[in-house]
Amino acid sequence: TVEFEADSFSPYVVTYLSEAEETVEEVAVEEPVVEDVVLTYTSEDEAYTATVTAAPEVLENVTAFEAVPVTDEEKITALTEQLTAKAAEAQKTSLGFENYEFKFLDAEGNEAVVEGKVKVSLSFAEARLPEAATAENVDAVDAALLETAEEGLEEINGLISAEAGAVKEVVYTTEAPEELILAWSGDVYRTLPNYEDDDVVITLAGTEYALQNVVGFNVTPIKEDNEETKEQYAEVAKQLEEKIAEENEAKEEEKEVVGFLAYDITLVDAEGKE
């Protein structure tokens, strides 16, 4: 009879060494490792490679995978409008996008249904950046991953490998992927025509979002000898005197206002309205 205590009921082997000695060995039984299924698609021009990784039960009937750019003009137009609006919500300008459609195929070439979490990666032979994002007046370029949801575009949490907006690779996990939208946005600056007189040159510049309805600006010099602006001139002079007085008190200095230039600036739209 062999008696022993154990925390679990793994298989045991009893080894008989002699009539007077018996030992018990615990034999560890390793469970089989189930590896994820990995499918890869490379574009015909080898410009990009897409890879999907998932558990075998998720890709049970899938033998091939494709990631192809969307070419439907209506969808491209609709997506352009959506991305323009979404960028405006963040006070940015949409700079371009790439839209990929995913297809999972069975052994007969028919589209297969995929249900469950899938890891997706998309890597480019050369970093991607829209031409609009390379202009000198563009700053703070950012790339985002999105997909179409019931209530519009939905941002995907993922890893974007990029430098100055130029994307080299994206990796993310999602449920049953059908498409990927890689979109760029940024600050696009515009400079309005200058104002110039004998004393100054005034230049105004801002982002396209800030100046979306502005085509120019009007400038009125505020002068003491002008009947229309002399009251405004006096008010500006008073404000400057008060400001200098406060600074003198704080810094124990004795400065005074010896002169100033003041201008009234108003932004105008295409019809000349403020």
Image (cartoon, grey):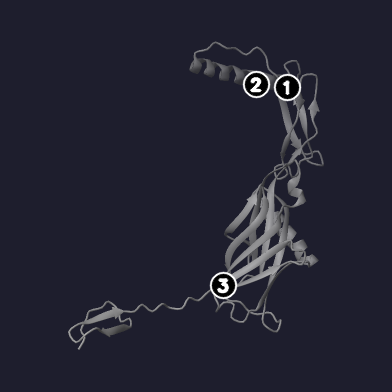
Name the residue that disc number 2 marks. Answer: 236
Element assignment for label 1: loop
Label 1: how many Cα within 10 Å (few below 14, some 14–19, many 20+): many
Q: Nearer the viewer, residue 132 or 223?
A: 132
Name the residue that disc number 1 marks. Answer: 222
| Spatial CA span between label 1 and label 2 | 9 Å
| Spatial CA span between label 2 and label 3 | 69 Å
Identify the residue shown where x is 79% and y is 28%: 195
Q: Are marks 1 and 3 in contact (CB under 8 Å)?
A: no
Q: Tell me the kind of residue under disc 1.
A: Ile
Q: Nearer the viewer, residue 251 or 66?
A: 66
Label 2: how many Cα within 10 Å (few below 14, some 14–19, many 20+): some
Identify the residue shown where x is 68% and y is 22%: 232
Name the residue that disc number 3 marks. Answer: 54
> Looking at the picture, how far across and down is residue 129, in whole percent?
72, 52
- Mark 1 vs mark 2: which is more N-terminal? 1
Q: Tell me the kind of residue under disc 3.
A: Ala
- The residue at the far bottom in this view is 1
